[in-house]
């Protein structure tokens, strides 16, 4: 287990990058705390896989350094970095039994037989593979094979970090719940540094202590799920986290209020004079319907039943405002009013959050 | 326009893949096939498309038996999970390709391609090659090609499964609108209940080669006919608990007992299984008549707006989905509360005996 330091790290796939846009990963300085579970989250092409490959040693960075516990590993190959990796598709030996598959990474490093036996049983118990330890891997379903892959990633206690590249993509929704919880329990027990790449927000938010939200090669925010939800530092984070994402509305700030299309919206805090593109961010969870005729007038275009909640698609002038309603809420009229919970409003200047 | 599967079944080398199935889909309807992997969704679609010949039964299209008709002679278009486009052709030519096969004239093709591309928001990429597009745009291109044919039956096999969830969210919102404009019969396969609910229309819940239930999506979600449908239609999975009823007394597995629950007073004495969804568990008592369970925390997962609590009730693993952020330590002993109105009651054979009483109140 190790602390991982990224120092002025940047990567371009071009030979002679000379512009910021040439970098798949823009300059990044960060210290990954030992024993923390991180998730890299962002749309495809955001640079999350590039960053993972730099840490694993599959790629050598164009600029900067990577340190494990203070030791420079920038030029080291994957094998010399002492890390475990789990990929999107199962990587196992079909001709071996489940037990042999799980033992393999330990045998390879000359661990003692007693220890291997004990450790394999521990891991198999943790991810519910104990009852099939002596089965051959071929003939098992894709789900189970991926579980074995996970087990192989988790079996070594001495690794610097475990890297996961979308490990649950091929897994059925119901089994995802089990596996995610099991990985989390293993993390609690072993305290490995874990880095988990995914494009699934639920997976990232629930798995990680800290989520790294990336967009166009840039890290926009590193924070806990609760912070990303309450205080997105960038409008993209607001949009990307949450389903539907944050409502982002163009406003001006006048006399301490936000003004949206001529309508005043009360704020909880004072903002100094702002220039540039000014926007108000409010999550659909914090918009409520009201009978107050002085609140923001909206037209409800559509209500979607998502099972445990409903999404109302509302409109004020040309602005779409999404509202989350309870499962049993009923909308009686298409024209109504909404209020924003003023404690939950964020103000953005040129896409970055302004501190009041 | 209608598609009817009459006593359709399929066995491969003696192994049943689809058990005897009857299903009738009407003109201009969205029909979701919901089920876990290997439940038979793709096989059923391949039978509808004519890619797979059923072992028994008939496929009736507009009243006509088309069971033996070749794929190319059927009024059908299909989109797959993998983005399938012709890599050497431009986006324009990709979308135009089915029309060229149909010998449409140049003018007709141009109008149709532009309309379809506009609808799917790829109008400005018509000159590019598919590989120069993002995954979302590539799948939009495949969708446009399926729509441009104007086929009466459009089959979509987990079309969004390989996309970022944000792109999925966007397309999920658009697909019902596109469908409404086309007037075709849409069939859409997915493993996710939330996707089925967002698409609306009708849902067939599939499990191990059988359609367990077919009906209006929100109706099937809130009134599942059996334990399997209820579970297929719940993500996170539904929680279950056995109980027995003697006179007015209900005793749950693990010892919690109650007397008199109004809507259960007509339930005959006997052994049952109670089922309830994770979002109906509360961390605080909200009503006096809620049932209290003492549980132990395994893991909590915070999404930002909600918390999933993985709990253990006398050895049974449950999941709760509660609003807000709750940091609960593993192994902590807590109480959770359940409103009896949210309980589904199943017989021991899995069939529904009484639906949750709240279900009729959701409008």
Image: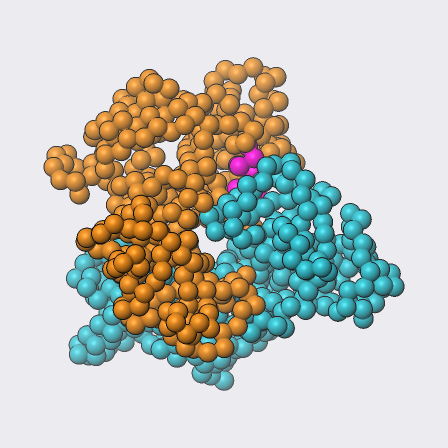
* Above or below: residue B180 compared with residue A3: below
Along the viewing direction, whichever of B7 and A278 lies nearer the viewer: A278
User: How many numbered dots are placed on residues in this image?
Assistant: 0
Q: Is residue A102 left or right of residue A49?
A: right
* Above or below: residue A161 compared with residue A229: above
Q: Is residue A200 left or right of residue B357?
A: left
Rendered residue at 45%/83% (across/down): B1
Q: Is residue B74 visible?
A: no
Chief secondary structure of the magenta portion: helix
Q: Is residue B354 visible?
A: yes
Along the viewing direction, whichever of A132 and A31 lies nearer the viewer: A31
Rendered residue at 13%/40% (across/down): A19
- Quarter-wise, where is residue A328 in the image? bottom right
Instruction: Look at the image and say whether residue A232 sits in the magenta stretch.
Output: no
Rendered residue at 29%/47% (across/down): A354
- Letter of the chain in cyan: B
- Letter of the chain in orange: A
- Quarter-wise, where is residue B265 in the image? bottom right
- Quarter-wise, where is residue B209 in the image? bottom right
* Above or below: residue A336 compared with residue A47: below
Along the viewing direction, whichever of B352 and B158 lies nearer the viewer: B352
Could you say where residue A216 lies in the image, as x and y percent from the top left? 25, 45
Could you say where residue B258 lies in the image, as x and y percent from the top left? 80, 57
Residue farthest toward the bottom in the current orientation of the protein: B63
Could you say where residue B80 lies in the image, as x and y percent from the top left? 39, 60
Could you say where residue B13 lies in the image, as x and y percent from the top left? 57, 57
Q: Over which residues does the magenta segment extend?
A: A178-186
């Amino acid at each position: 287990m190790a602390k991982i330091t990224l120092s002025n790290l940047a990567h371009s796939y071009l030979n002679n990058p000379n512009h910021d846009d040439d970098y798949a990963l823009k300059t990044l300085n960060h210290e990954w705390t030992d024993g923390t579970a991180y998730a890299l989250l962002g749309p495809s092409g955001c640079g999350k896989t590039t960053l993972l490959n730099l840490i694993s040693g599959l790629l050598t960075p164009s600029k900067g350094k990577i340190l494990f516990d203070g030791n420079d590993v920038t030029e080291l190959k994957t094998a010399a970095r002492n890390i475990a990796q789990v990929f999107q598709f199962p990587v196992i030996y079909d001709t071996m039994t489940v037990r042999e598959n799980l033992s393999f990474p330990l045998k390879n490093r000359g661990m003692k037989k007693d220890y291997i036996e004990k450790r394999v049983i521990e891991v198999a118990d943790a991810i519910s593979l104990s009852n099939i330890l002596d089965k051959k891997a071929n003939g098992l379903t894709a789900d189970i094979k991926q579980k074995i892959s996970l087990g192989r990633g988790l079996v070594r206690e001495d690794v610097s970090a475990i890297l996961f590249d979308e490990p649950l993509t091929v897994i059925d929704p119901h089994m995802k719940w089990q596996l995610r919880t099991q990985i989390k329990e293993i993390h609690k027990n072993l305290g490995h540094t874990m880095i988990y790449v995914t494009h699934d927000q639920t997976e990232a938010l629930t798995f990680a202590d800290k989520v790294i939200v990336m967009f166009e090669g840039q890290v926009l925010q590193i924070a806990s799920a609760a912070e990303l939800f309450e205080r997105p530092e960038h409008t993209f984070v607001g949009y990307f986290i949450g389903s539907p994402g944050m409502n982002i509305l163009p406003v001006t700030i006048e006399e301490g209020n936000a003004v949206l299309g001529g309508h005043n919206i009360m704020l909880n805090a004072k903002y100094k004079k702002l220039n540039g593109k000014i926007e108000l961010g409010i999550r659909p969870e914090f918009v409520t319907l009201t009978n107050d005729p002085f609140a923001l007038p909206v037209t409800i275009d559509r209500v979607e039943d998502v099972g445990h909640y409903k999404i109302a698609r509302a409109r004020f002038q040309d602005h779409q405002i999404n509202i989350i309603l309870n499962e049993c809420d009923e909308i009686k009229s298409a024209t109504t009013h909404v209020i924003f919970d003023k404690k939950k409003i964020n103000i953005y200047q040129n896409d970055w959050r302004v501190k009041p | 326009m209608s598609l009817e599967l009459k006593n359709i079944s399929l066995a491969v080398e003696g192994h049943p893949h689809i058990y005897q199935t009857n299903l009738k889909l009407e003109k201009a309807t969205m029909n979701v096939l919901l089920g876990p992997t290997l439940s038979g969704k793709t096989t059923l679609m391949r039978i509808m498309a004519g890619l797979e010949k059923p072992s028994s039964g008939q496929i009736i299209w507009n009243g006509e038996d088309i069971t033996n008709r070749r794929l190319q002679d059927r009024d059908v278009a299909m989109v797959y999970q993998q983005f399938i486009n012709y890599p050497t052709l431009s986006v324009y030519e990709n979308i135009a390709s089915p029309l060229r096969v149909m010998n449409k004239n140049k003018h007709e093709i141009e109008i149709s391609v532009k309309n379809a591309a506009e609808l799917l928001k790829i109008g400005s990429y018509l000159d590019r090659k598919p590989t120069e597009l993002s995954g979302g745009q590539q799948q939009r291109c495949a969708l446009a090609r399926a729509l441009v044919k104007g086929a009466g039956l459009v089959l979509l096999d987990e079309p969004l499964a390989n996309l970022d969830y944000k792109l999925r969210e966007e397309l999920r919102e658009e697909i019902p609108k596109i469908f409404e404009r086309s007037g075709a019969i849409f069939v859409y396969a997915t493993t996710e209940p939330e996707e089925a609910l967002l698409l609306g229309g009708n849902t067939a819940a599939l499990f191990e080669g059988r359609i367990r239930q077919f009906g209006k999506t929100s109706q099937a979600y809130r009134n599942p006919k059996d334990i399997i449908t209820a579970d297929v239609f719940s993500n996170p999975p539904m929680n279950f608990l056995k109980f027995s009823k003697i006179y007015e007394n209900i005793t749950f597995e693990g010892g919690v007992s109650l007397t008199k629950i109004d809507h259960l007073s007509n339930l005959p004495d006997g052994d049952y299984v109670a089922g309830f969804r994770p979002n109906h568990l509360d961390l605080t008592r909200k009503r006096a008549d809620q049932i209290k369970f003492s549980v132990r925390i395994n893991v909590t997962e915070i999404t930002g707006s909600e918390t999933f609590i993985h709990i253990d009730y006398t050895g049974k693993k449950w999941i709760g989905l509660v609003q807000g952020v709750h940091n609960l330590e593993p192994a902590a002993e807590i109480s959770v509360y359940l409103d009896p109105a949210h309980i589904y009651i199943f017989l021991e054979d899995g069939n529904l005996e009484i639906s949750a009483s709240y279900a009729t109140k959701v409008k």
